[in-house]
Amino acid sequence: MTARAGEARPAHPPAAARESLQGHYAGFASRFAAFAVDVVVLSAIFLLVLAAINFVASIATGKTVDLNRNDIWVVVGYVVWAFIYFAHFWGLNGKTAGGALFGLQVLREDGGDVSGRRAIGRTLAFPLSFLILCLGFLGILLGDRRRALHDVIAGTVVIYSWDARAARLRYLSRPRYSAPAAPAAPPGPPS
């Protein structure tokens, strides 16, 4: 079927945009990007809370209070906050802020939701993947189910919960403008 002059053709997204990644195991790049976003979010929240504590303490004592990363309590507080952040969100719905942004979700191996206990276990095992030159992450690159060491220990998998790539490609492939409407035919002579 060919379109006549002035007729708009229906726009079809490219084949790559019609291919869905939803339900597939998440790869290294998207998981790393989600982790980077999570580190930025949890660090920003922690710094805001730390600034508020500094402000309140300086008003209450009348002296300037300087909490910095050389203070052991700040380091311990950051580690505790990171633990709470990951364990809470993985246990709540399997998604952290970075995971939600990149369409990632943590599930049990059988596809069920992650329980609070399993989320805590995964969070405790997470630092083990960083040991010995980050070899715990090698399973994401080489494994058929793309599981890191902490996924194997906790019995979890990470999947794409929505297809961000296809959504982006559909957005980019949509027509930026539509063809002008064909002019109306002039009325015919009266009969």
Image (spheres, helix red, strand yellow):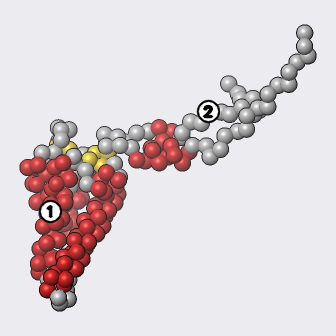
Q: Name the residue under label 2.
A: 10
For the C terminus, which image quadrant? top right
Pick whichever, 151 or 186, lies toward us.
Answer: 186
**Is residue 116 placed above or below 66 in the rendered structure?**
above
For the N terminus, which image quadrant? top right
- The answer, for residue 179, to whether it is visible in the render is yes
Q: Where is residue 70 in the image (x, y as percent from the top left)?
A: 17, 84
Regarding mark 1 in the picture, which secondary structure is present there? helix
Count residues near mark 2 (Cα–Cα under 10 Å), then give few for <14, some for 14-19, many for 20+: few
Q: Position of residue 114 (x, y in %)?
A: 16, 45
Q: In the visual, does 39 lie left or right of 183? A: left
- The answer, for residue 152, to whether it is visible in the render is no
The image's mark for residue 83 is 1
Pick whichever, 157 or 68, lies toward us.
Answer: 68
Residue type for callout 1: Phe
Q: In the visual, does 4 lie left or right of 141? A: right
Q: Position of residue 168 (x, y in %)?
A: 47, 48
Q: Residue at x 70, y 39 (%)?
A: 179
Q: Which residue is drawn at 19% across and 78% down?
A: 56
Pick whichever, 50 or 85, lies toward us.
Answer: 50
Q: In the visual, does 181 lie left or right of 97? A: right
Q: Position of residue 83 (x, y in %)?
A: 14, 62
Regarding mark 2 in the picture, which secondary structure is present there? loop
Q: Quick one: which residue is furthest to the top in this view? A: 191
Q: Which residue is drawn at 11% across and 78% down?
A: 73
**Is residue 112 placed above or below 38 in the rendered structure?**
above
Residue type for callout 2: Pro
**Is residue 65 placed above or below 111 in the rendered structure?**
below
